[in-house]
Image: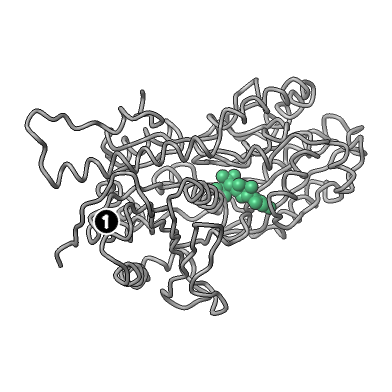
Amino acid sequence: MAARRRPRSAVPRRVATLSVHTSPLDQPGAGDAGGMNVYVVEVSRRLAERGIAVDVFTRATSSDLPPVVEMSPGVTVRHVSAGPFEGLGKEELPAQLCAFTAAVLREEAQHEPGHYDVVHSHYWLSGQVGWLARDRWSVPLIHTAHTLAKVKNAALATGDRPEPRARVIGEEQVVAEADRLVANTDDEAHQLVEHYGADLRRTLVVPPGVDLDRFTPGDRTAARHRLGIADDAVVLLFVGRIQPLKAPDLLLEAAARMLADDPALRDRLQVHVVGAPSGTGLQAPRQLEQLAAELGIADLVRFLPPVHAERLAEHYRAADVAVVPSHNESFGLVALEAQACGTPVVAAAVGGLRTAVRDGVSGVLVEGRDPADYAAAIRAVLARRELLSAGARRHAASFSWERTVDSLVAAYTAAAEEMAMASQGPAPGTLLRPAWALGGVRALGA
Ligand code: UDP
């Protein structure tokens, strides 16, 4: 079917955001809900504040969900019926993409042609839907991968299943089709280019942000009192979905090592794990509880269910160190949030964590996966906590969702201009303005 066209201005007025497998209304920290959900919420809200309306399409996972929910002014969540509401795993969703796409196209067809100016897809499943929507609506497709199968498979945790070939192929297709690929870091952009053959000129580095009004240093003593933590406790904090990739087990092993080296710590050391299980493998907290018992530290470990951001900020403030020992992270928002609260981070020297944490300034990056190295890094941070806390606050302050949105709007606009010019054919002597020449959007390696 021929695409419908209309003359359009390059600055978008309405964005179709696709988030097939997880809803921005879900509580992050469990199941499929994590950093991507936070990203979609923060970006959508700010786009709407700038007068750019956002419709977020996500799969309905319960019959109780209303078809349309206003998440915040100007941001509408549209629940799409695609497959059974419950009991469908993420790995089964590729079979529902046709139903999902049909529903998105039907929704748009109820409006005047040109209802959406841009499609922004999150994760490869949404990229597949966005690809068709882009062709049908003649609008640019902006894609953010969030994670990449080839990268994940190269750093698999024990007990984690490799991502299937179908996903790799699906990602390659989206990379080839998208008008802009948004990477969180230079590292991710290089991965897109090297492993997926992404076009350098269409690959942009747009760092995510952190809400500096919500994640503030605050009063550590008061936070501890509110959470029932003793003033002299040494608190090591893990926040996130409990899954092999995130490796909370490594933190427990490091804590046990710290106790073996310094038995006097036993009265004060605490490990707090905030989050709930996700995916396959480490079906914690039960397995983690078992590990803690085997390591003889069961009495020191507290498992806490996922909490809202306000409460989470209290946990960050109350902690001495946040530990992010992931096998891989495309960014690692938790690390940034902890630093914004003035808590230094010990993190794996992998992926986006190398950007999210400034080694020796806002925390310590650890090469390899030896618990003894993590124990040493935690001790080093504890010894210089005040200095690193100041560094952490400074580092976090260099990120902001406003800047993320500046760059995204510039990318939307540049892609729309390019599409408009391509459809008209360039005027004699006209040079196409490359996306990387726009302010706020850095090209790979620039
Ligand atoms: N999170 C939350 N409550 C919790 C645990 C986590 O709101 O109890 C949020 C956290 O604030 C962060 C996100 O979940 O923004 C996790 O993002 P991250 O990039 O660290 O990891 P991902 O889930 O994307 O792998």
State which quarter of the image contains the C terminus.
Answer: top left
Question: In terms of image quadrants, where is residue 183?
Answer: top left
Furthest residue to the left? 428
Question: Is 389 in front, or is 110?
Answer: 110
* Residue 12 percent across, percent down from the top left: 35, 48
At 79% from the left and 22% from the top, the residue drawn is 383
The yes-or-no answer for disc 1 within 8 Å of ligand 1 is no
Query: Element under label 1?
Result: helix
Q: Residue at x 59, y 34 (%)?
A: 348
The answer to whether any part of residue 399 appears in the image is yes
Other residues around mark 1 within 10 Å, as few (<14) / some (14–19) / many (≥20)? many
Residue assigned mark 1: 134
Left or right, 193 with respect to 432, comes to: right
Answer left or right for 340 relative to 88.
right
Horizontal relation, residue 337 to residue 405: left or right: right
**With 198 as the anchor, is 214 left or right in this view?**
right
Q: Is residue 251 above or below residue 36?
A: above
Residue that appears at 40% across and 34% down:
205
Q: Could you tell me the amino acid type at mark 1? A: Arg
Give the quarter of the image for residue 280: bottom right
The chosen color scheme is one colour
Quadrant the N terminus occupies: bottom left
Please state which of residues 230 and 58 is positioned toward the viewer in this rendering: 58
Whether residue 245 appears in this view of the structure is no
115 or 34, nearer to the observer: 115
- x, y percent for residue 231: 91, 37
Q: Where residue 402 sits: x, y (%)? A: 52, 38
Q: How many marks?
A: 1
